[in-house]
Amino acid sequence: MGEIIKVDSASLEEFKASFAQAGEEYKANLARLTNFITEITRGDIQGDPANDILNKFEEKRATFNNIASLIDDGEDYLGIKGKKFETTLSEIQSSVK
């Protein structure tokens, strides 16, 4: 107890970048999966296979959303979200010039 963990700023920035990238990828994949499940159940696959896929997804939906929420909390804690906004704003300003 009471041990101090020292981290250099370069390593912390590398971790933040990795965390942000993994978080973005997870959320994008969750959105793709959600869209895919919707397409399957509204499209060509009907009956028991579609219902089984939908039921399995619905059983896990809360877990998937909780993970996304934890990623959001981590991004807030690390200050990543604010930087994303600043980066996006800078990119927009650069492209307008």
Image: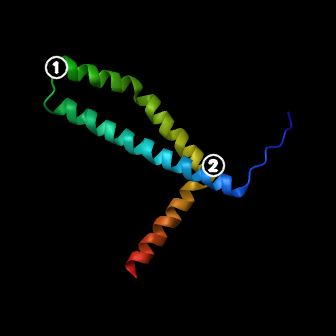
Q: Residue at x 21, y 32 (%)?
A: 40
What residue appears at the point 57 percent right and 55 percent down from the top-left corner? 80
Q: In the structure shown, which secondary structural element does the residue marked by tag 1 occupy?
A: loop
> Is 51 left or right of 57, judged from the image as shown?
left
Report which residue position mark 2 lands on.
77
Q: Secondary structure at mark 2?
A: helix
Task: List x then y, in percent, for residue 84.
Answer: 51, 60
Q: Residue 67, position in %: x, y?
A: 50, 35
On the image, the x and y values in percent for residue 11 come to: 67, 52
State the quadrant of the C terminus: bottom left
Q: Is residue 47 above or below residue 78?
A: above
Of 48 and 12, nearer the camera is: 12
Mark 2 vs 1, N-terminal side: 1
Q: Badge 1 is on which residue? A: 47
Q: Amino acid at mark 1?
A: Gly
Q: Quadrant of residue 49?
A: top left
Callout 1: 10 Å neighbours few (<14), some, many (20+)? few
Alpha carbon of mark 2 to alpha carbon of mark 1: how far? 44 Å
Query: Going 56% across and 53% down the picture, which residue do you hit?
Result: 17
Query: Which quadrant holds the N terminus?
Result: top right
Q: Which mark is residue 20?
A: none
- Circle count: 2
Between 42 and 16, the one lying in front of the other is 16
Residue type highlighted by circle 2: Tyr
Q: Residues within 10 Å of mark 2 (few under 14, many from 20)?
A: few
| Residue that appears at 49% across and 45% down | 23
Mark 2 vs 1: CB contact within 8 A: no
